[in-house]
Amino acid sequence: MSVSSLNILVVQGTIREGRYSIHPARYVTDRFRERGHAADLFDMKHYDIPLFTNRRDAVSDPHPDVDAFGQRVEAADALVIVAPEYNHSIPGTLKNLLDHLYPEYEETAFSYVTVSAGGFGGVRALSHLHDITLEFNAYPGPDLPVSNVRDAFDEDGTLIDETYEDRFEEFIEAVVEHAEQFAPLPVGTSPEAGV
């Protein structure tokens, strides 16, 4: 199935000062937009996400920023999580954000970009993200570990490591293909159309 335009939510997974993971988050958001998709970047740094005490669906008056995130997740055909690896896992801020929702993620296509300052590209964070996605009854998909992120992007966010250009393009294509498997059909079409 081919969906003409997907709603893709890119989630930036840390609020840390000097974070380099914002660069690939902006980069993939721009690449999705260039391909005609409605890509939206949710940068936690611009929100006041409270410490988790209860899920959004379990309270009558969720925190406005949690509710805003929940609405964006509900509107998305796919989520792309962009996160650094902290201490062999994902940032606590990202886990806190994700824990505020649960049914909103069900049957959603997830993909991941993980980054590290060293040579492993955040693979341990990636492993945890896969596990979390499965717990949400969602669909884990393509991933792109970015090693030595400070050498891949400059301080302005420009991709300077040419070896990653093709990798990002392949990742973007894979995310779209993965999301199209689970995105709802446009109104007025059927699965048999075009067969």
Image (spheres, rainbow, N blue to C red):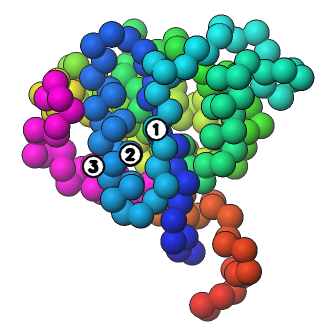
Q: CA distance from mark 3 to mark 1?
A: 17 Å
Query: Which residue type does callout 3 highlight?
Result: Phe
Residue shown at the point (46%, 59%) measured from the top left: 37
Q: CA distance from mark 1 to mark 2?
A: 7 Å
Residue 133: image location, x then y, percent: 61, 36
Q: Which residues are magenta?
A: 154-175
Residue shown at the point (61%, 49%) measured from the top left: 76
**N-term-proximal mark, 3 vs 1:** 1
Residue shown at the point (63%, 60%) measured from the top left: 182
Residue shown at the point (70%, 22%) measured from the top left: 64
- Whether residue 23 is visible here, answered yes or no, is yes
Residues 58 and 146: in front is: 58
Quarter of the C terminus within the rendering:
bottom right
From the viewer's perspective, tell me whether residue 94 is left or right of residue 98: left
Q: Where on the picture, by quarter, is residue 188? A: bottom right
Residue 146: image location, x then y, percent: 26, 33
Residue 104: image location, x then y, percent: 73, 39
In this figure, which residue is indicated by the disc labeled 3? 168
**N-term-proximal mark, 1 vs 2:** 2
Is residue 164 depicted above or below 77 in this figure? above
Quarter of the N terminus within the rendering:
bottom right
Count of numbered labels shown in the rendering: 3
Is label 1 in contact with label 2 (beta carbons under 8 Å)?
yes
Query: Which residue type does callout 1 highlight?
Result: Leu
Residue count near mark 3 (Cα–Cα under 10 Å), binned few <14, some 14–19, many ≥20: some
From the viewer's perspective, tell me whether residue 97 is left or right of residue 126: right
In this figure, which residue is indicated by the disc labeled 2? 29
Residues 106 and 42: in front is: 42
From the viewer's perspective, tell me whether residue 161 is left or right of residue 32: left
Indicate which label's residue lies in the foreground, 2 or 3.
2
In this figure, which residue is indicated by the disc labeled 1? 41
Residue lying farthest bottom?
Answer: 195
